[in-house]
Image (tube, helix red, strand yellow):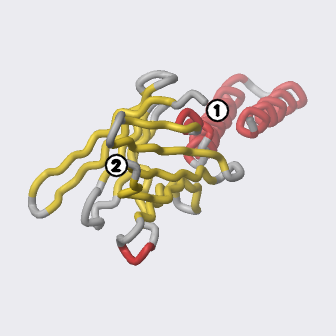
Amino acid sequence: MQKYYLILDYLSFIKILFFGIEWNNDLKMKTLSTILLFILICNQAIGQNSLEKFSWIIDNWSTGKGKMVYYETWKTNGDKELVGHGFMVVKGDTVYSENVSIMVEGDGIYYYAAVSNQNDGKAIPFKLVSSSSDEIIFENKEHDFPQRIIYTKKSNLKMVVVVEGIQKDKQRKETFRLKRMRC
């Protein structure tokens, strides 16, 4: 929402600039072009560090039935962080657990994953490399596995999470087809 107020401020500035001062047409066009380019660049920069377009992952998700079920839950923690927790239950026992977050930081947006019993409990960073209204792609080429984590919105009730990369010199890919849980 802040982004739109900023654009309105720019438009008010342009109105004052153009209607408050007498300009010749050539200078008006050059100035207007420069200001519009500036607005476009600022708008792009503001959008790059916003988690607003990732809001579709916020909820409780699950996949599987019976003996093996994977759960993932996401919620907001202010306007610069989403926090989540994923865990897998097999025959009533939790066999896998991870704490995850998506955070806006100085040079971009990062996904952090801290998996129980791995990496001394330290969170591993994955930098956002691509995003759209229905897909988020994070990457860390230095990590053993995975190197890429991809969230894709299939509908309001379904999303697919793919973790992929090279492990032991072989391509590996795991796909989780999650459904929004209704409580």
Label 1: state its secondary structure. helix
At x 58%, y 53%, the residue is 83
Q: Is residue 182 left or right of residue 32?
A: left
Image height of 34 relative to 88, above or below: above
Q: Residue lying farthest front?
A: 91
Instruction: Name the foreground residue: 98 vs 57.
Output: 98
Mark whose residue sits in front, 2 or 1: 2
Q: Residue lying farthest left?
A: 169
Label located before the other in sequence (2 or 1): 1
In percent of width and height, residue 81 lies at: 62, 53
At x 45%, y 59%, the residue is 98
Residue type marked 2: Val
In percent of width and height, residue 26 lies at: 66, 26
In percent of width and height, residue 149 lies at: 35, 49
Which quarter of the rendered picture does the N terminus lie within?
top right
Image height of 19 relative to 126, above or below: above
Q: Is residue 26 left or right of residue 171?
A: right
Whether residue 166 is visible here, answered yes or no, is: yes
Q: Residues within 10 Å of mark 2 (few under 14, many from 20)?
A: some
Which quarter of the rendered picture does the C terminus lie within?
top right
Whether residue 152 is visible here, answered yes or no, is: no
Snapshot quadrant of residue 47: top right
Residue 36, label in figure: 1
Q: What residue is disc 2 on?
A: 90
Snapshot quadrant of residue 120: bottom left
Q: Residues within 10 Å of mark 1 (few under 14, many from 20)?
A: some
Residue type marked 1: Leu
At x 28%, y 56%, the residue is 146
Label 2: state its secondary structure. strand
In percent of width and height, residue 154 lies at: 41, 25
Q: CA distance from mark 2 to mark 1?
A: 56 Å
At x 77%, y 35%, the residue is 10
